[in-house]
Amino acid sequence: MINFKNISKIYPKNTVALSDINLVIKKGEFVSIVGKSGAGKTTIARLITAEEKPTQGYLEVLGFDMTKIPGSRIPELRRQIGVVFQDFKLLPESTVSENVAFAMEVCNIPSNLIEKDVDRLLRLVELSSKKDKFPDQLSGGEKQRVSLARALANKPSILIADEPTGNLDMVMAKEIVDLLSKVNELGTTVILATHNKDIVNRVEKRVVTLEDGKIISDISKGRYKL
Amino acid sequence: MKFYSIKRITKFGVVSFWRNLWLSLATITIITLSLIIASSTVILNALINTSIKTAQDKIDISVYFKQDTRESKIQDIIFELEELPQAQSVVYIPKQEALEKFKQKHQDDILILESLEELDDNPLLATINIKAKEIDYYPAIVDFLNQERFRDYIEKIDYNDNKIVIDKLNTISKSIKKGGFLVGLAFITISVLMIFNTIKLTIHSRGREIEIMKLVGATNWFIRGPFIVEGILFGLISTIITIIILFFTINKISPQVSLFFTDYEETLMGYFLVYFWQILGLTLLMSIALGVVSSLIAMRKHLKV
Ligand SMILES: Nc1ncnc2c1ncn2[C@@H]1O[C@H](COP(=O)(O)OP(=O)(O)OP(=O)(O)O)[C@@H](O)[C@H]1O
Ligand SMILES: [Mg+2]
């Protein structure tokens, strides 16, 4: 499903974010990617969604050769991947429910279905009462949950959650992680990038540890070391 | 593209139009000004060209023969005139025909008809009307007729010289064409730049938004679409305003303008109405092209996320 082969990513001005990454993620897996700040977790997510192109190596996602994917097919790829962005990436001029709906609107889903699904998703992340608020009027944790609702909107085959609990208290964080596990049980491949030890240990699934852009360990049923 | 997305794109375009109402209004004003200048230039030019044509059609040389000139002599002269390379047409009106025409023209005027009856002879003169192939050829024909050898037969030569009027109209037409073209071009350039900048500004301020849209899987067309819809809206509204302004302005000034071209039957309003659909179509086409093309150009760079 996802296959990194000797991938390196060098940002402009010679910042090496990833070097020589080999990583295979199979359908239905739950993979936690851990590592200190700047280790390269977000960069891995960006490569998977074609937000960045690898500098070197071969990368395949959902059958697409990411080194050669043409711009016109990127939307098709992205519609199959839900992302909870570390910085939320909510449309500032749109309300909570409009934000969630937008992801479905770009997929040509009929309006009456969208309406129902948005309600359901917002109930899932416990934000029904805030559905007409604008992102400015939300707390960090609330924005994060809107981002999660949007990521789940199109029933993606891959869900990438980049630090989805960063702004949440422990109770809420645990609820979110349980939600991710549930989504995973329903068949979605989940990639969770975080540096929250308790969260990773709670999941008890495969853990890939990054340090300075390299994979230093890859353990199934792992725990956060470092 | 599916029906849903077209509907959505239209909705997004209209919403964006309203959200940036002031910018939209400014853009519409500029497009409208360009359209008014461009279309007034075209209408005025058409009017003047018709006036020139009418004036040109009215030029001719009338030759009146003396009462006692023999028919055969007249025929000789007609023959010679027809041979002239400058002559386009030579129309002969014999005395009898001239009389009938005169009677016809004054058929309600009993006094004139009665006095005509009293005369034994036909008092009217045989006439020929000559038209030249080009306006510049008339003097040559007049010179030809002024020759010594025709003195005895010709009573008078009437050269209806509209040349001064025509030259004047030509000069006006040229300066209108030039001036209208330059001002029109300037305004069109301004409107393209303005729309261009409006959209660039919007896109710049909404660059983050566009980036997010792309990251959740929006296609370029889904993002571009609303801007095109906006461009079409600009065009539609500008066209309506332009046509309304043109109508009322022309309605107001048409009588005066007609007075100026008093000899000619065209009125400005008449022109406007005859060519209404062409004017409307052209204005619409131009304004929508202005709106859409500039928005597409402005978008181009920002879609490479
Ligand atoms: N757009 C960019 N341009 C240049 N350098 C970048 C860019 N994005 C990230 N980097 C660099 O690449 C490295 C990896 O960044 P990345 O965002 O992947 O880290 P991370 O593991 O997600 O960190 P965090 O836990 O703080 O989110 C860092 O050194 C960072 O400074
Ligand atoms: Mg990160």
Image (cartoon, coloured by chain):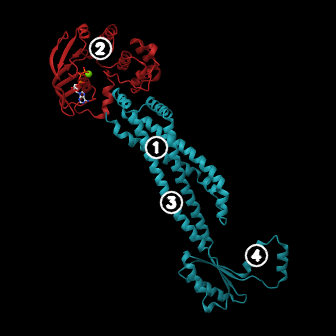
The kind of residue on which mark 1 rests is Gly
Q: Chain of mark 4?
A: B
Instruction: Tell me where residue A20 appears, x and y as whole percent.
Output: 14, 26
Chain (red): A
Q: Which residue is mark 1?
A: B291
Camera-side mark, 3 or 4: 3
Label 3 near label 2: C-beta < 8 Å?
no
CA–CA distance between discs 1 and 2?
Answer: 47 Å
The cyan-coloured chain is labelled B
Q: Earlier in the sequence, mark 4 or mark 1?
A: 4
Q: Are marks 1 and 2 on the same chain?
A: no
Same subunit under labels 3 and 4?
A: yes
In percent of the image, x 23 and y 24: which residue is there? A44
Ligand 1, image quadrant it occupies: top left
Q: Secondary structure at mark 1?
A: helix
- Tell me whether circle 4 and circle 2 mark residues in contact (CB < 8 Å): no
Label 2 CA crowd tier, 10 Å (few <14, some 14–19, many 20+): some
Type of residue at label 3?
Answer: Gly
Q: CA distance from mark 2 to mark 3?
A: 71 Å
Query: Residue tagged by mark 2?
Result: A187
The C terminus of chain A sits in image quarter: top left
For the point 26% across and 15% down, which residue is it? A28
Between the residue at mark 4 and the residue at mark 1, the CA separation in whole angstroms equals 62 Å
* Eye-nearest disc, 3 or 1: 3
Q: Same chain for the residues at labels 3 and 1, yes or no?
A: yes
Q: Is mark 4 within 8 Å of ligand 1?
A: no
Secondary structure at numbered mark 4: helix
For disc 3, the marked residue is B179
Q: Of circles 1 and 2, which is in front?
A: 1
Give above or below for B207 relative to A117: below
Which numbered mark, 2 or 3, is in the foreground of this view? 3
Sequence order check, earlier mark of 3 and 4: 4
